[in-house]
Image: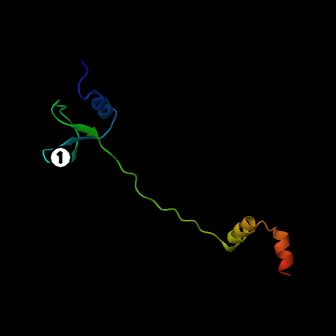
Amino acid sequence: MKHKHADLIHAWAEGAQIQYKDEADIWKDIDSPAWHEWMEYRIKHYTKPQTKEWVVLTEDDLRKIILAATGVAEATLKERNK
């Protein structure tokens, strides 16, 4: 019969960080699990850090965006500004 924690044991052998649930129902890291069948184990959940991306636009970039959005050709705009 397959061990209760066989999948977790395999993941741990492959390098996964394992946690166990203590008496206060708090998950804690454990480096060398005993793999007791009466204990609860899991693979540690990692949260992806939140990142922000910034975009820097030059005046020329903004002009190109406006031209593209309005459908006005650049040559037409130059003619209007003469």
Is the N terminus in the top left, top right, bottom left or bottom right quadrant?
Answer: top left
- Secondary structure, mark 1, is loop
x 21%, y 46%: residue: 28
Quarter of image, res 62: bottom right
Quarter of image, res 34: top left
Dot 1, how many residues are within 10 Å of its Cα: few (below 14), some (14-19), or many (20+)? few
Quarter of image, res 5: top left
Going by the numbered disc 1, the residue's amino acid type is: Asp
x 40%, y 52%: residue: 48
Residue at the extreme front? 70
**Drawn side of residue 66 relative to residue 53, left or right:** right
Residue at the extreme top? 1
The residue under label 1 is 25
Q: How is the image coloured?
A: rainbow
**Drawn side of residue 48 relative to residue 42, left or right:** right
Measured from the top left, where is residue 29 in percent x and y? 23, 45
Residue 9, compared with residue 2, is above or below; it is below
Residue 25, compared with residue 39, is above or below; it is below
Is the C terminus in the top left, top right, bottom left or bottom right quadrant?
Answer: bottom right
Measured from the top left, where is residue 7 in percent x and y? 30, 29
Residue at the extreme bottom? 82
Residue 30, compared with residue 4, is above or below; it is below
x 23%, y 37%: residue: 41
x 32%, y 33%: residue: 11
Measured from the top left, where is residue 44 in percent x and y? 30, 43
